[in-house]
Amino acid sequence: MRKFQLWQTGGLVVVAAVASVLTSAGPPHRAVDALGVGFAVVAAGCLLWRWVAPIPVLVATALLVVANAAAGYPPTVVPWATWVALFTCFCACARRYRAVAVAVTLAAVVGYLVFDRGAVQAETVFGVTMTFLIAVVAGDAVRSRGAAAAAEQARQRAEERTELARELHDSLGHAVNVVVMQAGVARRVFDENPGFAREALGHIETVGRDALGELDHLVRAVRTEQPPPGLAALAERVRAAGREPRLRAERVELGAGPARALHRIAQEAITNALRHSDSGRIDIHLRRVADTAVLEVVNEGGHLPPGRPGHGLANMRERARLAGGELEAGPFEGGFRVRATLPAEARR
């Protein structure tokens, strides 16, 4: 960026020098000589620091405009730098500094009108006014556009943080619930069946390692493009927790977003089933209906507490919505059902 500004300013300096030499000055103005070219070159050179110190650069170029007029040279090239500096101030400065920039520019205009040897003409006033307005409006437009882009970027970062929090809730919540279930089983059967207890501890280690691996993966990339684990892996976790799973999964082609959403919804539904009931079968059924994929997770366990809707259901609904689908969840006689409908890819 610094190199680009150097080349840009160098080009302006060359153009200012050439334009000054080619400018024809007649009475009452003084003919352009080395000093007049120097005014134009120095004014253009000041623009190298216009993004670092816009107000001081504007002050310097404004003083050069007044000095150029006081020396008797025509106001053709030197004011260019002032208008560019004014534009920069309205691009980069806060409101109070923009007011200072307007005051400095108006002071330069007054100084030019006082010291210029030529008569003040309506065309001159009109030209100065229009140039002033163009610099102000254009600079403010660029600043507003940059602010809008920054706000959009901040919104996207907030959405990514929300998505990461949702991923962590779904993944780690599922893993922690399975670990708690396995630990409880191991504790209850430790004396009567130490072999089964050791097997439960092995499942705890496996689930914990998987959770740590997924956490590391989520930290590296909020939105991973790798496919999520299949439903079979979730069914195995149900079986490892001492519950009876029944998996019926048709082959359904899904895009990356719907596939990830489906996996997380199934994971959260299974987590809720393990958390809120201690027995009964958990059915996981995936099928294609027309151009949609329908996932149902049915918990037939008893002793379901009435409870209150938590973050799990809200997260599942939000995931389904973001993937272009919808989610229904609620109790039925003898259990609880979660049903997600997500868009499937066209059949080949």
Image: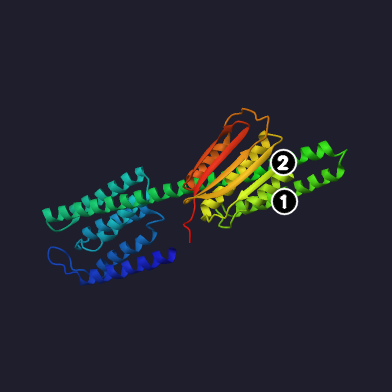
Report the mark closest to the observer, 2 or 1: 2
Q: Amino acid at mark 2?
A: Arg
Which image quadrant is residue 71 in?
A: bottom left
Q: Can residue 173 be seen at all in this image of the molecule?
A: no
* Of pointers 2 and 1, the one earlier in the residue sequence: 1
Q: Who is closer to the viewer here, 46 or 114?
A: 46
Which image quadrant is residue 80 in?
A: bottom left
Which structural element holds mark 1? helix
Q: Residue at x 67, y 51 (%)?
A: 233
Which image quadrant is residue 225 in?
A: bottom right
The N terminus: image quadrant: bottom left
Dot label at residue 121: none
* CA–CA distance in space, label 2 to label 1: 21 Å
Q: Who is closer to the viewer here, 258 or 93?
A: 258
| Residue indicated by mark 2 | 243
Q: Can residue 194 be seen at all in this image of the molecule?
A: yes
Asked if residue 156 lies left or right of residue 92, the reply is right
Is residue 17 placed above or below 297 in the rendered structure? below
| Residue indicated by mark 1 | 209
- How many C-alpha atoms fall within 10 Å of the one at disc 2: few (<14), some, or many (≥20)? many
- How many C-alpha atoms fall within 10 Å of the one at disc 1: few (<14), some, or many (≥20)? few
